[in-house]
Amino acid sequence: MLAGIERTLANRVFQNTIIFVILLNAAILGIMTKRDLDPGVLSLLEFLDNSCLVVFCVEIAMKLAVMRLRFFRDGWNVFDFAVVAIALAPASGPLAVLRAMRVFRLMRLVTAVPSMRRVVSGMFGSIPGVASVAGVLFVLYYVAAIMATNFFRPVDPENFGDLGSTFFTLFQLMTLEGWPDIALTIMDEMPMAWAFFVPFIVMTTFTTLNLMFGIVVNAMEEAKEEEARAEMAEKGMDVEPESNEVRLAVIENDVKGMSGELERLQAALSRLYPAKTIAGE
């Protein structure tokens, strides 16, 4: 029986059904935010919402039956369990506030779609590197804020009147939102002010932030390699952390994804132009 449950959990149709239920639940929760809903419609939506919750509970129960305590060794499973448990909180009493957090059930889409899961894993894996870059960025901000406050406060006290307002103005400069207006206001009185604004924008927007993005992308690639390594370990293949086999497995997964996209595109073209011969058929 457990073997049958395990096969069901691994079945592509079952996984796609769970994704569909998550998306359906997202639509239901969005509709329920509308004002002045008809009581009959609201009752139907609540019934569908509870039905989605039942499906999630059944899925969690199936995983617990198969994996037992191993279920809690996977952080994604713990996240799913916590999200579903919150949704089971009573609608009244001191725990009623947790019912408002049932929208977190939609985050289960991240755990259900491998590509999204890889992105989140990469983001968490990049935290140490991103924290280092953020520290450098904060030092740049602090130095620039003190300089800008001392230099530009007499000219533009609204944007550079104190350290707090200067920090906010520098953040606006970093996002390139309206920075010419701020800079030109200062340069009307201090023509050499460009010597502050241009280096600051180059160092923050075009250098430090791009370095941060690079760290995140690199962490996502490492998460992809780790996923491929785990898949090969499940097949009984022992590989080194930086082996060519892992990299080839990653490339193979990417090629499979592109092949699937090409097949779907070819099928779509066949439906649009049935009388024409599609190249490669």
Image (cartoon, rainbow, N blue to C red):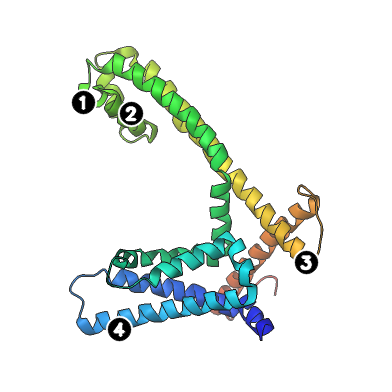
Secondary structure under tag 3 reads loop
Mark 2 vs mark 1: which is more N-terminal? 1
Q: Indicate the quadrant where residue 2 lies.
A: bottom right
Q: Which amino acid does the dot numbered 1 rest on?
A: Glu
CB-based contact (under 8 Å), mark 2 and mark 1: no
Q: CA gap, disc 2 to disc 1? A: 12 Å
Give the labeled residue for mark 2. 167
Q: Which amino acid does the dot numbered 4 rest on?
A: Leu
Secondary structure under tag 4 reads helix
Secondary structure under tag 2 reads helix
| Front label number (1 vs 3) | 3
Disc assigned to residue 235:
3
Is any part of residue 209 visible from this angle? Answer: yes
Q: Describe residue 161's horizontal placement relative to residue 278 as left or right.
A: left
Counting other residues with Cα less than 10 Å from the Cα at mark 4, is it few (<14), some (14-19), or many (20 or more)? few
Q: Is residue 146 above or below residue 56?
A: above
> What residue is rendered at 27% in x and 82% in y?
43
Give the labeled residue for mark 1. 158
CB-based contact (under 8 Å), mark 4 and mark 1: no
Give the labeled residue for mark 4. 44
Q: CA gap, disc 1 to disc 3? A: 64 Å
Extreme residue in the bottom direction: 1
Q: Indicate the quadrant where residue 73 lies.
A: bottom right
The image position of residue 243, as x and y in percent, is: 79, 49
Q: Which amino acid does the dot numbered 3 rest on?
A: Lys
The image position of residue 265, as x and y in percent, is: 58, 70
Q: Describe residue 38's horizontal placement relative to residue 130 as left or right.
A: left
